Amino acid sequence: MASPATATDYSLEKRPASYEPYEFTLPELYRKIAKDELREDDEIREQSLAQMRDWIAKHPYIRKCRTDASFLLRFLRFRKYSVPMACEALERYLAMRETFPTWFKRLDCNEPMMRELLEDGVFAKLGQDANGRTVIMFRVKLLNVDRFGPLEQGRLVALLIESLLEWEELQIGGFRVLLDFTDTVMKHYGMWGVTDMKIFMDAINRSYPIRFREINGAKFPKFAVSILNLLLTFASPKLKERIVCHNTVLEMKGKFESKLVPKVYGGELDTDDMSRKFLKHLEDRRSVILALDEMEIDVAHYSSLWHQSNLVENEVDGGVAGSFRKLNVD
């Protein structure tokens, strides 16, 4: 997969004097996927970018925003070139970041705790399958839950999403997720409170322009099923439909091409090497990710999107034990 554009300084002017021209440089596979699944072609793309830029320029509540093609296309592709829906998605994304900055802003790969999480091997980007979908993997047991709580875990995922969205291949082809829950313990699940779940799942469902194609989980422990069910109450029906559960890692491995199977599962892919390359990518794009914080929207206008009454307050120790009692969940 080719790296994203090398630019590291994007204008935040709502009405820049000019826009950099866009050139589609991906393999033909992605041009076909874009046309067949997203209704994208050269003419539609240019018309939609022009309409979205004009909308941003006239928007009374957006103060600063990137208007380059590499940024706006992730929203247009997410909404299959419905410009009104893409604009709504951008609004929600900007409002989310401003409303919950402790979760979604200051995502710095060089911050010590973030760095430790990245180097622990929890996450790996494995490559692309024959259908152009990016495949990523999480080995949950490698997550040090004695050191990192829901906020740190959520911020790690937010950083990964922001960086992955820079690849146009992922914007067009979407991605598949492998979740290996082997040897996890109750603490991996019990520390997430209902408020944490709601904020994070709303971001995944409605605020980040990501195309989930498939989510595969293996060896999910029975003792945590009730917690998973609670989490899924905040998931959209479309997201739920894409979840596939496997009894064993071997069963899950069978769904993926041999070139994408890590050594730890008997394949040939060196995930340590992949992790080093991804960390290098994060370092190279660090300024781009941090500069997203400089975008501005009048967040007070969007406060109704996240009614505080919908968030469970005063959770016992911030964990789901108290939340279950509050919601009468078995």
Image (cartoon, rainbow, N blue to C red):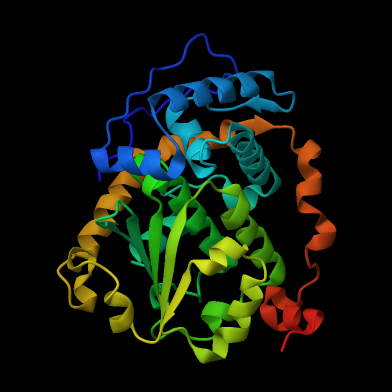
Would residue 212 be visible to someone looking at this image? yes
Front-most of residues 185 and 209: 209
Q: Is residue 276 left or right of residue 223?
A: left
Front-most of residues 146 and 48: 48
Residue located 43% across and 64% down the image: 214
Q: Residue 280: where, in percent of width, then height?
A: 29, 47
Would residue 167 be visible to someone looking at this image? no
Front-most of residues 96 and 33: 33
Q: Residue 205: where, in percent of width, then height?
A: 60, 56
The residue most toward the left is: 268
Q: Residue 184: where, in percent of width, then height?
A: 44, 83
The residue most toward the top is: 17
Residue located 42% across and 63% down the image: 117
Q: Residue 278: where, in percent of width, then height?
A: 30, 51
Q: In the rendered image, which quarter contains the C terminus?
A: bottom right
139 up-or-down from 250: above or below: above
The residue most toward the right is: 309
Front-most of residues 258 and 142: 258
Residue located 57% across and 19% down the image: 13
Q: Quadrant of residue 321?
A: bottom right
Q: Is residue 196 left or right of residue 224?
A: right
Residue located 22% across and 70% down the image: 262
Q: Is residue 48 left or right of residue 323?
A: left
Q: Is residue 122 left or right of residue 54?
A: left
